[in-house]
């Protein structure tokens, strides 16, 4: 089977060393196996994504010596693909509209603090969505939709897991994993004005692009449990994953787009060579 890996940045800022590490990890994984390496631009957040950042991403990757196969896939050009997947899940009765504001969710969570067991938490320590709108009657949902209220479309996690049954997935570095998507609760899959969220979009994209090895950072390890569930519900093929370690700064903090000092452009301006920057990103030639 041909290895197909990908790099999928969001054009909300300039690439930094952490991005370079991730891109190189996917590129070397694919090229080392004689496979294909794809570039995807994850630009569903139209309020933060900028064309100039996308242009810079393409330029910096080429400067680093990376090439990719086929055209660049931009999520904003494929809304219909996400709508089609969402329709499949809706047809299975697994999606419900959530009208809660952040303030209302926080208030309900606060009210639950005095319960015997309190609210459950996600792996990052934030409280799970308490399922408020899952309990609405069909008429209550219809009335709120008719009023034109903003909403998010959430996955009914308990029912989705019941439908899918036990699932597992494999990470090339961490080994076999039993899928535990319930740890993230009723995740948002779309919103009134945007027909997809990160979880749905990347699952659909990886299937359409034929990705066989999903290379990305350890910060997305827990999200993979949800993506494995969505693959099962949508009848998709199952890739393997390769979650690499994250690069950190001198203080041990994860590199982020606001880390201007670690931006590829900053190193280029200093006169560093591509080989030097690849080495700083953990991939010496």
Image (cartoon, rainbow, N blue to C red):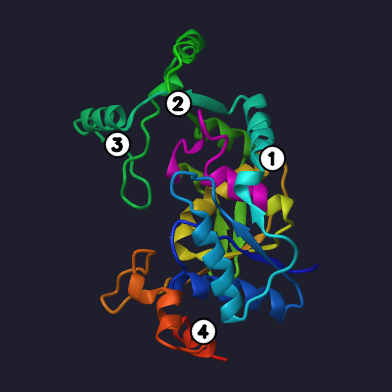
Tag 2 and tag 1, C-beta contact below 8 Å: no
The residue that label 1 is drawn on is 81
Question: Mark 2: few, some, or many residues within 10 Å (few <14, many ≥20)?
Answer: some
The residue that label 4 is drawn on is 278
Question: Mark 3: few, some, or many residues within 10 Å (few <14, many ≥20)?
Answer: some
Q: CA distance from mark 4 to mark 2?
A: 43 Å
Measuring from the top left, give residue 275's x and y in whole percent.
Answer: 53, 89
Measuring from the top left, give residue 92's x and y in whole percent.
Answer: 65, 27
The mark nearer the N terminus, 3 or 2, is 3
At x 42% / y 22%, what residue is drawn? 133
**Mark number, residue 119:** 3
Q: Is residue 281 above or below residue 156?
A: below
At x 26% / y 35%, what residue is drawn? 118
The mark nearer the N terminus, 4 or 3, is 3
The residue that label 2 is drawn on is 151
Q: Is residue 135 above or below residue 82?
A: above
Question: Mark 1: few, some, or many residues within 10 Å (few <14, many ≥20)?
Answer: some
Is residue 258 found left or right of 29 in the rendered image? left
Asked if residue 174 is among those painted magenta in the image, a careful observer would answer no
Quadrant placement of the C terminus: bottom right
Magenta segment: 183-205
Q: Is residue 216 above or below residue 191?
A: below
């Amino acid at each position: 089977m041909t290895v197909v890996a990908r790099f999928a940045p969001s054009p909300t800022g300039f690439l930094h060393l952490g991005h370079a590490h991730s891109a190189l990890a996917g590129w070397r994984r694919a090229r080392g196996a004689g496979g294909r390496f794809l570039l995807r631009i994850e630009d569903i957040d139209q309020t933060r994504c900028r064309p100039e950042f996308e242009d810079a991403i393409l330029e910096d990757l080429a400067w680093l010596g990376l090439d990719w196969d086929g055209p660049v896939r931009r999520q904003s050009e494929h809304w219909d693909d996400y709508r089609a997947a969402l329709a499949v899940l809706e047809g299975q009765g697994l999606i419900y509209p959530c009208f809660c504001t952040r303030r209302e969710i926080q208030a309900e969570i606060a009210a639950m603090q005095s319960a015997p067991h309190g609210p459950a938490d996600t792996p990052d320590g934030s409280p799970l969505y308490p399922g408020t709108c899952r309990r609405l009657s069909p008429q209550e949902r219809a009335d709120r939709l008719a009023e034109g209220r903003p909403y998010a479309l959430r996955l009914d996690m308990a029912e989705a897991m019941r439908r899918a049954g036990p699932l597992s997935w494999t990470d090339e570095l961490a080994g076999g994993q039993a899928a535990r998507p319930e740890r993230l609760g009723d995740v948002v899959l779309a919103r009134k004005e945007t027909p997809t969220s990160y979880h749905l979009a990347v699952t659909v994209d990886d299937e359409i692009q034929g990705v066989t090895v999903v290379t990305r950072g350890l910060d997305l390890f827990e999200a993979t449990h949800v993506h494995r569930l969505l693959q099962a519900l949508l009848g998709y093929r199952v890739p393997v994953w390769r979650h690499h370690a994250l690069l950190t700064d001198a203080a041990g903090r994860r590199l982020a787009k606001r880390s201007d000092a670690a931006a590829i452009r900053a190193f280029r301006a200093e006169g560093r060579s591509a080989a030097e920057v690849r080495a700083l990103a953990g991939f010496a030639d």
